[in-house]
Image (cartoon, helix red, strand yellow):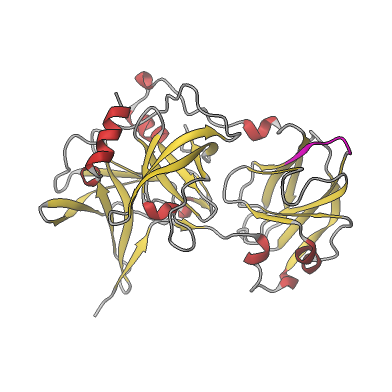
Amino acid sequence: MRTLALTMAAMLLGGSIVAATQDAEVAQVKLAEAILELKAGTPAEVTLPADTAILQGFSFEVPRDAKSMFLVVSDANADIDMVLLRGSKAKDYEDLADRAVLDRTTPRVNETVMLDATTEPPLKPGKWWVYAGSLVAEAEEELTFTMTLTFDKPPEAARAAVAPFRAMAGLAPMQRALDACVRLDTEFGTGSGTVVTPGGLIVTCLHVLTDDNDQPVSEGIYVSFTHSPRQVARQSHLAKLVASDKALDLAMVQIVADLDGKPIEKPNFTWLPLARSEPELDDDLRCIGYPAIGGARSLCSISLTRGVVSGFVERKGRLQWLKSDCLISAGNSGGTAVNARWEFAGIPTEVLQDSETMESLGYIRPVSAIPAKWQETIAAGAK
């Protein structure tokens, strides 16, 4: 008898660099021989060779009058691991792991490490070192990224992001859908979502926003936007969880601030309306989101797949699922399924796959299954 495997279409991310390599052979991780001097305000561009896990070391001096420090990794072609230490440089990776005062695995496009008197570790004057690279970089590809250091003010590159506010009157239907489909990140994983009001209300899957104990993450939700399918989405906003339904595996989050924590004064996000009617069999569907297969681990450009409504699952007279041959992969969860009118028709959620034939069928939660109170909130926000 063939068995069907159920896959939730979310992508999980690792935690710290030290934890990620506890079971790996430390000897396989190398430190670059040359240490680069990191000067405040001067971006350092790095290229590391393929086939080897290498961490590039940087040295810098923290002046006595510095109140805060910002280290920013940007323009990377893969997830970047960063380790910070004080005193002398690391002899090897084992020494680095033993002496690390801070380690960070970046699950987002731009990663900022900020230290001041209140952080752990606290900022202190003197010699510091940071090592950056990727322990899981693709073997076929060189690793490239830029490291920038500033004191008392974040570098402008850290603030640069795709502006999510655009006049919708001139947008083609597909462009509006691309703008409204966002990438969502927490420290535990990543997925997709759909902006459904100009005020920044987002509908997604609850499992996109759960921690290692399967509990919802209420804050620390990062939102990324793109205007171009050719470019990786840029992180620009923070959101918080405002509603969840475990039985339906649905969640609603609200964009509340920019990356500096400043509230959005006049939000006017590109958004999609809920479909006016439920799809019929053989209706066209397009699924949009940020699947891991569409990029280098968490750095994914937006992807669109096309299919039809292949079937339905009803319970107690209510439509619970749309079945579809649209390709849905890890990272697509919570994203945007649109009908032929480019209305928001459903939330890609999971895949049933035959373990022998590898045939699969996607399951999409129709927007009609969104709880009534949520729909009222969405309707009020869309006016």
In the displayed structure, 278 sits above or below 213; it is above
Position of the C terminus, as image quadrant, is top left
Magenta span: 64-70
Position of the N terminus, as image quadrant, is bottom left
Image-quadrant location for residue 17: bottom right
Query: From the viewer's perspective, is 275 left or right of 157?
Result: left
Residue at (69% x, 74% y) in the render = 25
Extreme-left residue of the structure: 317
Q: Is residue 24 visible?
A: yes
**Residue 345, image x, y percentages:** 25, 41
Query: From the viewer's perspective, is 228 left or right of 353?
Result: right
**Residue 14, image x, y percentages:** 57, 60
Q: In terms of depth relative to the viewer, which is nearer, 97 or 242?
A: 242
Query: From the viewer's perspective, is 261 left or right of 25?
Result: left
Q: Is residue 316 magenta?
A: no
Q: Is residue 342 visible?
A: no
Q: In terms of depth relative to the viewer, which is nearer, 139 or 351?
A: 351
Q: In terms of depth relative to the viewer, which is nearer, 242 or 46?
A: 242
Residue at (84% x, 50% y) in the render = 128
In the displayed structure, 368 sits above or below 27; it is above
In the displayed structure, 315 sits above or below 254; it is below
